Image (spheres, grey):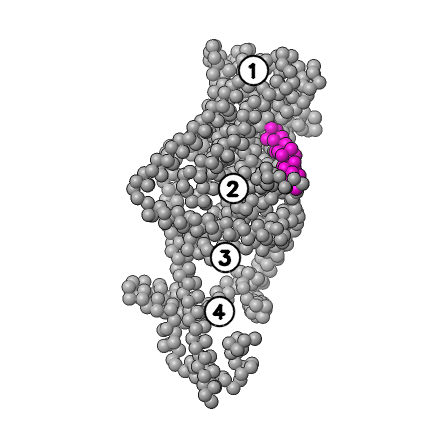
Amino acid sequence: MSESSASALPPGRHQPENLSLDSSCFSSPPVNFLQELPSYRSIARKRTTVPNREKQSGTLLKPTDSHSSQLQGGIAENLNSQSIRKYALNISEKRRLRNIQETQMKYLSEWDQWKRYSSKSWKRFIGKAREMATHLELWRKDIRSIEGKFGTGIQSYFSFLRFLVLLNLVIFLIIFMLVLLPVLLTKYNITNSTFVLIPSKDTDVQCTVYPISSSGLIYFYSYIIDLLSGTGFLEDTCLFYGHYTIDGVKFQNFTYDLPLAYLLSTIVYLSLSLLWIVKRSVEGFKINLIRSEEHFQSYCNKIFAGWDFCITSRSMADLRHSSLRYELRADLEEERIRQKIAERTSEETIRIYSLRLFLNCIVLAVLAACFYAIYRATIFSQEHMKKEIDKMVFGENLLILYLPSIVITLANFITPMIFAKIIHYEDYSPGFEIRLTILRCVFMRLATICVLVFTLGSKITSCGNYSCELCGYNQKLYPCWETQVGQEMYKLMIFDLIIILAVTLFVDFPRKLLVTYCSSWKLIQCWGQQEFAIPDNVLGIVYGQTICWIGAFFSPLLPAIATLKFIIIFYVKETSLLYTCRPSPRQFRASNSNFFFLLVLLIGLCLAIIPLTISMARIPSSKACGPFTNFNTTWEVVPKTVSTFPSSLQSLVHGVTSEAFAVPFFMIICLIMFYFIALAGAHKRVVVQLREQLSLESRDKRYLIQKLTEAQRDMKNRLDWQ
């Protein structure tokens, strides 16, 4: 131990003779000494500049207050309502507080004692239940192993994938309980119930014709086509909307309204998805909001708190080192670009904005070209889908059926590479380049689904040479248009899974073999090993989840297929990560990753709600299939159900949905929003004050250490003179 370290030890243990000297070093009045602290000087300076805040500043940053006494005082006040375990105290202090708590219990009434013991037992039970629930988590061992080998960034992707599995499972259970279960119970005579057929209505016979193709029995490969496209033997199953052509299920005491249940299941699973995503994203949003306020601490956070202690692999540790170096270089580059922006002349600013405008026009042109290609491919596929199967070979038929999916997949594969090339010429900071590229890719992937759905909607509502007034839609081409939209979503889901499996088996694995055994070739060295890019993989599964949200209304079993698909993707991606891919050098923090994933998922949900709302409220329902054949639109089942309510309840519903209620409700919501904005501003000011207090405390400690060092030096000099 060095001499200075020895001198810093408590004098009562090693140098008892120096006790009087230590006290003499601080013989000056304590008030004068405390007035020299930086925090006290800051308070005094504030009192002279802002006298009206003297009391508030003095109470907030009073240097003579003891932190331990304040903490123990707060604990003593909240001892009855808070758990001692949550306080950062040593064992002896916690035991002392527990003894105080037990002593207080003796003076309480029997009722209060019972409530205290019941509350404590309930909290203990909740804690044990949560601990057991963590052991029942899906893929808990696998995800922890990935976290230990590759860090929290990649682990967050697999946790997000697990969340989507659970979400789709819950969506399937909702649809199963509300729609499938009553139908299955009646169909297989499990309960004493019967189907209520849809009453006849003055509808033209031509609108009720729904020919289901049975040509799949002729050719041996037709079963494969039906399985991949949802046609043939799958078309009239519970997989699609057209199978549920009944008005309800009649039990002994009541009649189950299937059309209403079908609509409510869609509203429930969309609302549940929204609430669940928002709830999970709140925590990540708070962390990102706090970090966005600490630009001045960016370098310190990366150097002193940037290490991921879950990493146990040497290669991942080296990768984390390079990632931190990359982040520091990116921060320095962003600082250089900010300085460059500040030093730009007006001519340079005009030039760079003109270049960005031109490049963004190119981006829009690329997006427009992709959307037009999807539009043309969808129209071509729909027009030739009714061609007789014996007039085309197996490959031609499959190509016609999957043409929109193929074009969408090619667009999703090509456009990110174009965007990555364009972004280099726009002169943005590295961090903003990544965010803007991801934003463009998100828009591209999710907008392609909307383009497909709206193209189908335009074909459904346009009748070509003859009028649509008879049925309200193109009954000749789409006798049951909901089922055919469900088939398109089904094909997108299946084709996306096929592409993921094909890329892993026929691209990633051969690439890994070439990099391993042919590494001396220059072409292979330039190609390199496949990177496990987190944003690209996330966009892929969000794309699949958006398809599931849109298609669940038209194909009720699609959430179950999505659940199985994501389970397969989990094991495929885990195998690919462990054996064929290397982690990307641009790593994500777990908090940033979770918030980014949920934000993209929320965008996908909003885009899924738009076509669903239009199809349920604007496009006429099919008259040949489905539970809404007697309604002009799907939404009409709600007014019909409200009309069966008692008159008082009808008046209440009409009042709640009227403008007289909407305007005051909107004003109240605005007032509540303004209140929370003001509350957030007050919390922000408190956070600023607390940060300033932490800064002053660190300065006080540094000042005290300096004074202590000077006192020890003076004491040593006195001993030398003696």
Foreground mark, 4 or 1, reads: 1
Which callout, 2 or 3, points at the residue further toward the start of the chain?
A: 3
- Asked if residue 472 shows in the view, the reply is no
- Identify the residue position indicated by label 1 in the image: 384
**Residue in the image at 56% along x and 81% along y:** 13
- Front-most of residues 166 and 547: 547
What is the crowding at mark 1: few (fewer than 14 residues within 10 Å), some, or many (at least 20)? few
Please identify the residue farthest to the bottom as the structure is shown.
722
Q: Closer to the observer: label 3 or label 1?
A: 3
**Magenta span of residues:** 494-516
CA separation, marks 2 and 1? Answer: 39 Å
Residue 303, numbered label: 3
Viewer-side residue, 533 vs 654: 533
Residue pictured at 48% horizontal, 86% vertical? 719
User: Considering the numbered disc 4 on the image, is that residue within a helix, a strand or a loop?
Assistant: helix
Q: Which residue is depicted at the point 54% across and 64% down?
A: 88
Quick one: label 2, few (<14), some, or many (20+) residues within 10 Å?
many
Tally of marks: 4
State the CA–CA distance, disc 3 to disc 1. 61 Å
**Mark 4 = which residue?**
68
User: Element under label 1?
Assistant: helix
Q: Where is residue 214 in the image (x, y as percent from the top left)?
A: 66, 15
Q: Is residue 411 above or below residue 703?
A: above
User: Is residue 19 shown left or right of residue 62?
Assistant: right
Residue at 54% across, 76% down: 2
Residue type at tag 3: Ile
Between marks 2 and 1 in the image, the one whose residue lies nearer the viewer:
1
Of labels 2 and 4, earlier in sequence is: 4
Percent coordinates x, y for residue 574 in the rendering? 64, 42
Circle 2 SS class: helix
